[in-house]
Image (spheres, grey):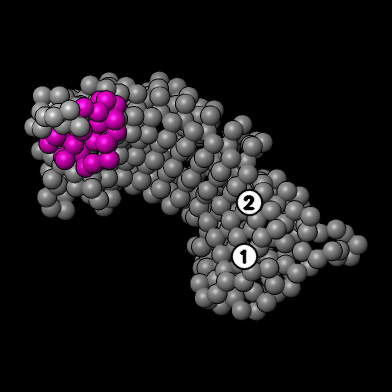
Amino acid sequence: MEGVDPISALPDEIKISVLSQLDVKYAIRTLVLSHSWRHLWTHLPCLRLGYLQDQLGVVGANVSSYWIQRVHHVVSSLRGPLVHFELVHRFLSNQTPLIQRLLDLLLQKGGVQTLHLEFFYHPLQVHLPPFHSLKVLQLYQCHVLLPTGFHGFNSLTTLELEQVEISNDHLHFLIHTSNNLTTFSGTQFVRNQSPLSVNFSSPLLRYLKFEIDHSIENVLVISAPCLEQVEIINYNQDRTDPSSKKLSLVALGLLISVATVSSLNLRCNILRRMCDAFFWLLRSMPFLEELNLTHGDYEVSDQINRVVILMEELLGKKRDGISCLNQTLKSVIIRTFLEAISC
């Protein structure tokens, strides 16, 4: 029809979907196109703001308080549910109250299902509001506190924590009140006054990634009947460090507690101290199909040769009359920083 803009004639749902693919500042600018576009941006279901996107015109290394207030204004102007919120940037410690007010505003808006916060260079203290619809929580470089009377995220399925400072009690409570948790990733925890001791009793957990370092006292899987894939990271094993053996024992303890998984990814130096124990454990993993072992050490040529021999035995028909894992184990990759060996 002559004189009719075909794009403006599209249903609002399609136009909002198109706006969701744009940077926020460009989506907001569409309000000048016509009367029918004036309020469309206020129905955006996703906001991704911060360093990489620079979506609201961030200038300089640190975000100004004025920029945070602009984010407040944008969130306050939204009329529909905000499903996904992502904030990544370098904030100053004195801006913590502004960030907390923003999180409280998100709680008032309701409907948040994915929350991604990353505060690099200056980790900020965050009191997590009780988002009732939250399904994915990704926190990077934060000091996390749970509010008084917190009852957990009943809908949470994915929890990712990296360079996070959190007390043992709060981490334990966060994990054990998330009954629908299917994915957990915890790496580079910031050491608190006491090391973390973590255990999982998660009926729906399928994927677990955990880094074991000096911030970790112990980590075990007590009950996770659906667990399929496990990734364990531990490169901090200085030969002169007396605690390196303890870290190896923690890693081995976690391995023992996940003996029924089908996929195992190890990025650690466990071969240095516990090669025999490790391969004895592999023979006790009846459902293991994929093994990826990355050894973070340049001085492992002799050990790697030994590993290849052990792997050949492991995949062989029999060893000393005992059946090996050839019935299930289909893929084995062993890597160092210099080479990769497939068996």
User: Which part of the image, by quadrant, shows the N terminus?
Assistant: top left
Q: Which of the numbered marks, if any, corresponds to residue 263?
A: 2
- Seen in the picture, residue 220 relative to 291 is either above or below; the reply is above
| Label 2 packing within 10 angstroms: few (<14), some (14-19), many (20+) | some
Residue 195 is left or right of residue 24, and the answer is right
For the question of whether residue 169 can be seen, the reply is no
Furthest-front residue in view? 2
Decide which of tag 1 and tag 2 comes sooner along the chain.
2
x then y, percent, for residue 13 = 29, 26
Going by the numbered disc 1, the residue's amino acid type is Ile
Going by the numbered disc 2, the residue's amino acid type is Ser
Residue 92 is left or right of residue 172, and the answer is left
Q: Quadrant of residue 320?
A: bottom right
CA distance separating discs 1 and 2: 12 Å
Q: Tell me which secondary structure the magenta stretch mostly adopts.
A: helix
Q: Which of the numbered marks, if any, corresponds to residue 181?
A: none
Residue 143 is left or right of residue 22, and the answer is right
Residue 333 is left or right of residue 47, and the answer is right
For the question of whether residue 328 can be seen, the reply is yes
Magenta segment: 7-31
Q: Which residue is mark 1?
A: 333
x then y, percent, for residue 73 = 15, 29
Q: Closest to the observer: 154 or 17?
A: 17
x then y, percent, for residue 169 = 47, 34
User: Which part of the image, by quadrant, shows the C terminus?
Assistant: bottom right
At x 39% / y 40%, what residue is drawn?
A: 138
Magenta-drawn stretch contains 29: yes
Q: Secondary structure at mark 1?
A: strand
